[in-house]
Image (spheres, coloured by chain):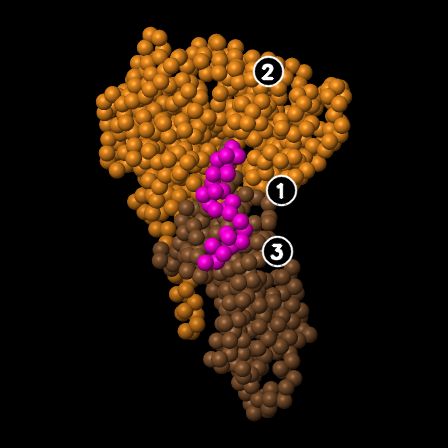
Amino acid sequence: MTGYILRRIASTVPVMLIVAALVFLMLRLTPGDPAAIIAGDNANADQIAAIRNRLGLDAPLLLQFFQWLGNLLRGDFGESFYFKKTVAELIASRLEPTLALSVATIVLAVAIAVPLGVLAAYKRGTIIDKIVMGFSVLGFSVPVFVIGYSLIYLFAIQLNWLPVQGYQRIGDGFGGFLQRLLMPALTLSVIYVALIARMTRASVIDVLEEDYIRTARAKGQSELKVLFKHALRNASVPIVTVIGLGIALLIGGVVVTESVFSIPGLGRLTVDAVLARDFPTIQAVILLFSLVYVLVNLAVDVAYTALDPRIRY
Amino acid sequence: MKFWRTGVLAAAVLAASVASASAQKTFKAVMHSDLKIVDPIWTTAYITRNHGYMIYDTLFAMDEKGEIKPQMVEKYDESADKKTFTFTLRDGLLWHDGQPVTAEDCVASIKRWAARDATGQKLMSFVDSMAAKDARTFEVKLKEPTGLLIFGLGKPSSNVPFMMPKRVAETDPNTQISDFTGSGPFVFKKDEWKPGDKAVYVKFDKYKPRSEPPSGLSGGKVVKFDRMEWLAISDHQQAVNSLLAGEIDYIEQPPHDLLPLLKGDVYLNMANPLGNQYTLRPNHLQKPFDNPKVRQALLYALNQKDFLEATIGNAEYYKTCKAMFVCGTALASEKGMEGRLESNFAKAKELLKEANYDGTPIVLLHSTDLQVLTNLGPVAKSLMEKAGFKVDMQSSDWQTVVARRVKKDPASSGGWHAMLTSWVSADILNPVMAGFINSSCEKASFGWPCDAEMEKLRDDFARATDPAKQKEIAEAVQVREAEVVTHIHLGQWYQPAAARKNVAGLLTAPAPVFWNVTK
């Protein structure tokens, strides 16, 4: 197992190098000049050229790339063109909101979707199954921002139960932190609930046909234990896969949700950085997201061995 | 039972909002942009200008009638030959670090401002010497009289000549400052500044306001709350929702299409009566706009109402105005614009024929992500095509337009022929300030008009000290403008701010300011 994990970690290096090269190239090939943005609307060509020179943007592309890579290997992500802070500082300051939102979303999604999926599987063909699957289809059809605005209209404007927007750090009070996190997490979790519920239903239906389920029932196990101790455990591998794959969706969803709810996380930082052509920040954030995605996939693969003892690497 | 107890406890924790009543009164605003750059001399960005008005003060300032009044200056003397000016600062002015404001600080600040600002650069061409005479007095000696000195020192909009401590003002003008000590009514809380999230200001308790009531950007700057937060809410609908829910107190620029939602506990405030001016800028370097007749054809082809209807829509918030130097100001005049800006397509076609326009497609840069600019492009394309132009409208985000418009390459190689933008009226009040009128060829801003007569008129304006003479020259500039067509003004539009009904004291000024405001 240790060898497998080490091999997987080693294989992230070429993956990250390719991502680094791709993102570096893409940024420099797309239209837009960060020097012009920094110089401001009334700058002339000379002022812009001076800024480009100061930022090293007029150096040959290969030289820029290797300089950046070299700094990266030393742990130096560079300085934001726009924010006059180091990229590391910027990312560190934005990590908590995104982590909080992501974790809250996953926890909420799993807590809602898995029981719903199990229920739908158990009540297959009934009205309950149809309702759950109907909501599931809605969940991944309706765009995240539409869900967000609808929840805001209902809970913040009409009922005045929750704030419209904003984020409160956990250190500034847990109550306020939860209050502000609830709606964004709910918004983002909808598509997850849809996906996970469907996968859970499909997997549990398969498992409910197995002999050991009939045996468990014959031995007098309660339906709850049959479903959650025997069926769900054996159906969990594809469910965990979907949860892991959903991280990719989460990254995209976080960008939209943070913008709608004004959460100062990595998603909004990405949007701001892209609009400002802040190359160092965009590069670092994309690398970070890629690394997270790779590591999550590894964690999912390792989790299989805990869920199914038959799986060995 | 255990489950329910836990549930009730969780609900209680959730319900306990941490926004407990604080002794501090905080005013929360959503400004038109997030504050990223905090050097108002290095950049002309309006959000940075607004930040400047919070933490810095100025020697002179414009009142609500548009007149320049002393602000940090207690008095000034002008010699009989109008070439020597002696300024004395008010007593008791302090920097945020507690040190007194001195004349040397002011001299250094003026120099740094003039190095970056077009009006300042023009002013410095008239200045022979500038030096502190004692702690509170400095003297400016001119080579010849100019009306630019007092006006320049009270310039209301970017770049505003904000005063900074000498140590800060001696920063290279092409490098951003990192010390935000000012002498203005608010102190910038750098430790609480989170770009992309919020900027925080607190009241400067040792600020010494003038005794007269506030008027525009001048007068007594009395701050009536303890703390101000500028929140970065990029989603306009969310900003409006937050205002309606009472989570914030003020929105600087709510989009016009959301204004109908702002009722109930919210009101609209027209703080800037001068508004903004839409503009089309042709590229004088590229054929066919290198031919003045083709540019004149454009002036006949376009009209202002179509642009204003398409972008603003509500006639309450726009005004057609043929005066280049803004309706409602001392230099406003329609001289030279007779018959123009009325979509006279026949006249436009005639001029194109005289110019032997060969149907070269006009590359029109169109920005898609700034709500107030988005609809200008399609209107321009439609009117130009009716006049006989062939138009290739190329859409992109605003930052790409900004990057592309400084290119002098041919349009077929990434260059451009025409672009559309908007000016804050406070930036274009006279021929020297109005950047697009600068016709100094290579030294002019993008578009690069080249006309010696226009430059002479601008120099004449800089020399004029008599208001009647200034008006005469401004009219001559406008007449010349109809021949040269450095740019085309497409009407004035107005942007109301929105505030909660418990907010009072918002001032009428060319920039949003928050002294005198109560909640």
Q: Give the main secondary structure, helix, strand or loop, of the magenta stretch.
A: helix
Residue density around tag 2, few if under 14, some if 14–19, many if 20 or more, within 10 Å: some
> Which quadrant: the C terminus of chain B?
top left
Q: Amino acid at mark 2?
A: Arg
Residue at numbered disc 1:
B396
Between discs 1 and 2, the one toward the N terminus: 1
Check if mark 3's residue and mark 2's residue have beta carbons within 8 Å.
Answer: no
Which type of secondary structure does the marked residue at label 1 adopt? strand
Q: Residue furthest top?
A: B80
> Which quadrant: the N terminus of chain B?
bottom left
With respect to residue B378, does A55 lie above or below? below
In the displayed structure image, the side of residue B174 where residue B333 appears, left or right: right
Instruction: Write down the quadrant of residue A123 in the picture.
Output: bottom right
Magenta stretch: give its range.
A44-70
Which type of secondary structure does the marked residue at label 2 adopt? helix
Residue density around tag 3, few if under 14, some if 14–19, many if 20 or more, within 10 Å: some
Labels 1, 2: front one:
2
Q: Which chain is orange?
A: B
Q: How many marks?
A: 3
Residue at numbered disc 3:
A143
Residue at numbered disc 2:
B480
Q: Chain of mark 1?
A: B
